[in-house]
Amino acid sequence: MAAIRHPITYRFPDSFPVCPGQRVLVPLATRKAMGIVLRPTSGVPPGIEVREALRALDPEPVLSPELVRLGIWISDYYLAPPGEVFRAMLPLRRETRRARLVRLTDEGKRKMGELAASLLEESRGSQEVALLAYLDRHPGASVEILHKKFPEALQRALAQIWVTIEEAERERSRRKVFAVRLVGPLPERQPRLSPVARRIIETLERQGPAEDHRQLLEAARANLDNLRTLSRAGLIELGGADTRGLSPGKRSVARDGGFPNGDLEAPPSLTPSQSNVLNDIFPRLDSGGFSAVLLHGITGSGKTEIYLRLIGRCLEQGRSALMLVPEIALTPAMQSLFFSRFGEQVALLHSGLTEGERDDAWWRLRRGEAKVVLGTRSAVFAPLANLGAVIVDEEHDSSYKQDETPRYHGRDVAVVRAQFAGAIALLGSATPSLESYWNAREGKYHLATLAERVGGRKLAAVEVVDMRQEFRETHTQVPISRRLKEEIAAQVQASAQTMLLLNRRGYSWFLLCRSCGQTQRCVNCSISLTYHRREHRLICHYCGYSAAIPSVCPVCGSEYLRYVGEGTEKIEQKFAELFPGARVARLDRDVARRRSEFLRVLSDFRKGKIDILVGTQLIAKGHDFPGVTLVGVVSADIGLGLPDFRAAERTFQLLTQVAGRAGRGDAAGRVLVQTFFPDHYAIRLAADQNFDGFFSKEMSFRRMMHYPPITVLANVVAQHEKLERAAQVAKEMGEFFTKVEGQFPGIKILGPGPAPLARVERRFRIQFLLKSVSRTRLHALLKQLADHCDQSGIQPREVMIDVDPVSIM
Ligand SMILES: [Zn+2]
Ligand SMILES: [Zn+2]
């Protein structure tokens, strides 16, 4: 189905009153489609055929006028087809599905009688008779079923016009969700498995039991029949859905993480600076108008308490509140806090929910039964009425940006939603994004600051370990310096907890052939595959493709293959070897896939049952581990080398955030950062935890290079499975830009050139980068580009337009 860039006008019969925000069924080309009523129009230009809408799907609008307006704004601002925007806003099950039904014609009925009465045995027993008799018993059976049962007879019956096919919309029945798990280890002598069966089993081995079979099917590119076959073969078990720990309401969500969840808890007392911030924010809420506040609070300064108090005040005023967090599944402590403060008024909205659970949460909010939302990016569309506050925690986090159409930024949409609702938008971070801090400096946002840690605790002292020096002195390239080893040994000796950050999962970065210098690459993407030891496979971190480990180089046949680089898996193993007495565990996306294991590691670490925790940026995100007194950064350099203008900002944020995990309890914390670039400003200023210093330094770089927030940016990529087509699309866009460039002064167009990731998920990517001093002008240019693409037959999926990209790779 092609995406449609513009809304379509329909006529509604008088008997069928509709309002904006209502879901309706409309004819679209030769089929029926679901639509959202946007606004009434008075006249239609002559010559345009207006079709009649079929019926309303709900008795009342599902989207409030405020949310309809927000959807239109997103569609316009991000140049996304409105249908796709509203689909993203409504996480509801589709109410209908298209069905092709077969019916007997009069001729068919006559023929059936004739055949049945026939004296000839073979005509009475023929497939045609069976088909017609079946249809007589099951009027309106689907084409798919009949095609399976009577493949040839159906063709003949259609040709003879004994039957006809009609299209119909069927109400979708509630689909059953199965939980899937492996029955046990595979038998010694493995049965011969088809590739799809192998994919299913591998996915289950990798991810653990699936709570929702549809997610498994997607990951393994399989269908339900494949699962049934494996179930009959006794290899997997299909059961009713296991919704434990995910459903809305109080339930066991909080208990999962080993956190208390009893009666509503009284809030702790506030520090003077927390009181100051609240005294600053509350009048803004009470005024009933829009305002945007950036809360810059250093790590451990108690931002969460500010959020909770603000939500509490909204509830006192009979208003609702919405809070976004980057990854809800990763913050069980936050869920626990919400339920303990606000009980049944809380609804969770995130992608880990099953369709049914999301549906329930959504309708609870729509009916006003729940008034507080804790959720990830798309929860910004939660159907809350009378909104008082929209809070974005860790507002700098790049996971707020959606990386598929509509490519909206959850944080920016949150601010616009607050504006439309007359609510307060509160963005919080210890390391605000340059955009938000710039907005605060420019007076667009009000700035509130928490400059001290709760309990008078000090920020951890940071020491930079120069790995060049280490190499000069030891003449060996090792991932762990003598200094870091020493410090950890002391920690282990003192039974104190250590956290080690390495922002790269897997065992080795890649498999290199020492004869020809080639690495094993993904067949779908232009990147090297990462070696994962647990699965003993090479895995693509972009598309999930995995390959067996070759015994010889597939390019030159050489046997000299070598694993290069260290990932979290390898570092975990190394530390377990170095400190045999210590309890070492790992936390990264591979572990997080198995939810129970993830929660167990988190809870064990909190309880002090783990001495050394190795992890990726997941361990840097908002966790509060009071026992951690040493944080080691194994390599601070991984992000710095990326060809992306935010590389320094990301490195600074990550280092500051992970350093903030140390010393949150009674003992002071220390941080060791290993790097080959000790003089890089991102590393130096993160070591000083000097946000203002970093902001000025980075702003001068952005100013010099014309990058946001000094300019506005759009990334335009021609993409296609065939390189020739991608090149053709890029060429046409290039010609368009050359033609209109003169009308848009102040816009710099770079490209076309291959994107840094020249191929992702089988698609070749050719990139243009547009930098503009004026957002209005950039928007006008992009709109013209979209129209031009429509006129020249370029499909929306062949062009990616990313407004305000967070990454330009
Ligand atoms: Zn080779
Ligand atoms: Zn790939």
Image (spheres, helix red, strand yellow):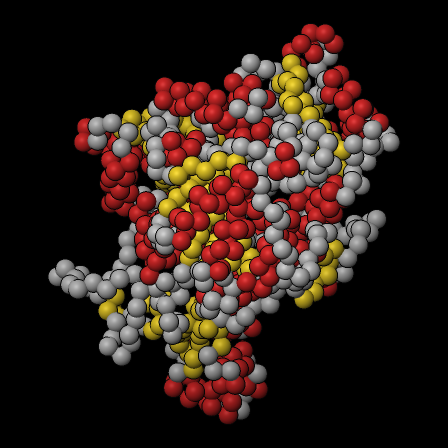
Query: In which quarter of the view is residue 213 placed?
Result: bottom right
| 174 relative to 712, above or below | below
User: Which quadrant of the figure has residue 461?
Assistant: top right
Give the percent coordinates (x, y) of residue 249.
60, 63
User: Residue placed farthest to the front in the image?
Assistant: 272
Left or right: 341 as drawn, with respect to 435: right
Residue at image coords 45%, 73%: 170
Residue 488, image x and y in percent? 77, 25
Residue at x 46%, y 42% (from the top left corner): 427
> Residue at horizontal 76%, vertical 60%?
234
Residue 288 in view here: yes
Could you tell whether 578 is left or right of 636 in the image? Answer: right
Residue that extends furthest to the right in the rendered view of this protein: 581
Which residue ends up furthest to the left in the rendered image?
46
Of residues 762 and 360, the one nearer the viewer is 360
Does residue 402 appear anywhere in the picture? no
- Is 333 in front, or is 245? 333
Picture layout, residue 399 above or below residue 702: below
Residue 104 locus on image (x, y percent): 43, 82
Front residue (pair 194, 367): 367
Residue, x 62% and y 49% (percent of image)? 268
Residue sitting nearer the eye, 329 or 749 = 329
Number of residue marks: 0
Q: Is residue 747 above or below residue 544?
A: above
Q: In the rendered image, which quarter is residue 601 located in?
A: top right
Q: In which quadrant is the N terminus drawn?
A: bottom left
x and y percent of residue 502 in the render?
65, 29
